[in-house]
Structure formats: C-alpha cells, structure tokens
Image (cartoon, helix red, strand yellow):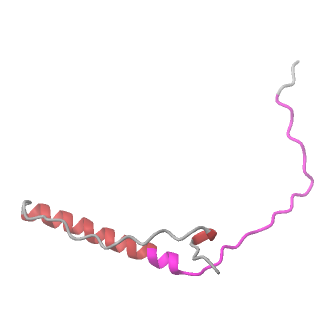
Amino acid sequence: MFASVGPRGGPRPPVAPAIPEPDLSHLTEDERKIIMAVLARQREEEAKEEAMLKEDKPIQARTVNLVGQKKPPQQNDVR
C-alpha cells in the first residue's frame, strides 16, 4: 500500500475546505471592495501554489568532488 506524498517525499498538506464568504454587509462599499480584492488575490495565489505543487519536475542534485582539500589556517596561533 502506498501513501500519498507531497513535495520532497513528505506527506501532502491537507486540502482546506472552502471558506464561505464573510458577511460584509456592515462595511462601506469602499471597505467591501478592498476586502473582496484581498480575497480574490488570496485565491489567485492559492491557485498558483496548487499548480506549482502539481508540476512533477524532479529535483536535480549535483555531486561535488573536492580536489586538493586543504586544512584552514589555525586561528589560535599565539606569537
């Protein structure tokens, strides 16, 4: 049995349930516009994030070979 995994092999984050629109009836029209714009921007960002998580691009790793390793100079030389 295979478990669903997210990026880098960790568990997938839980899917957030749809949040109902807040009651904005007590606000002015300008305040409602501001809040609705923020909510729309949040939905766009969440959609972008979801799209990025769905892309199956493998992470490429590089192996670095160290040639001629030298010890760093001693810092505690007393003269």
Q: Position of residue 31 (x, y in %)?
A: 13, 61
Up the image or down, 53 lies above or below 70; here it is: below
Name the foreground residue: 42 vs 2: 2
Most frequent secondary structure within the magenta stretch: loop
Instruction: Tell me: 17 left or right of 53.
Output: left
Residue 73 relative to residue 39: left or right:
right
Farthest residue in the right direction?
68
Q: To which quarter of the image does residue 37 belong?
A: bottom left
Question: Looking at the rendering, which quadrant does residue 64 occupy?
Answer: bottom right
**Residue at image coords 20%, 63%:** 35
Q: Where is residue 44 in the image (x, y as percent from the top left)?
A: 34, 74
Query: Going 26% across and 65% down the picture, which residue do you hit?
Result: 38
Q: In this view, does 78 lie to the left or right of 51?
A: right
Q: Where is residue 54 in the image (x, y as percent from the top left)?
A: 51, 80
Say left or right for 15 vs 8.
left
Magenta stretch: residue 30 in it? no
Please give the name of the residue rendered at 58% of the width and 71% of the height, measured from the top-left corner. Answer: 7
Residue bounds of the magenta highlight: 50-75
| Quarter-of-image position of residue 19 | bottom left
Task: Compare residues 72 and 42 and report the one nearer the observer.
Answer: 42
Task: Locate the N terminus and report the quarter of the image it occupies.
Answer: bottom right
Q: Residue at 93% across / 53% down in the picture?
A: 68
Which residue sits furthest front?
Answer: 1
How many labels were placed on the picture? Answer: 0
Locate residue 53, reporting x and y percent. Answer: 51, 75
Quadrant where the image shows the C terminus: top right
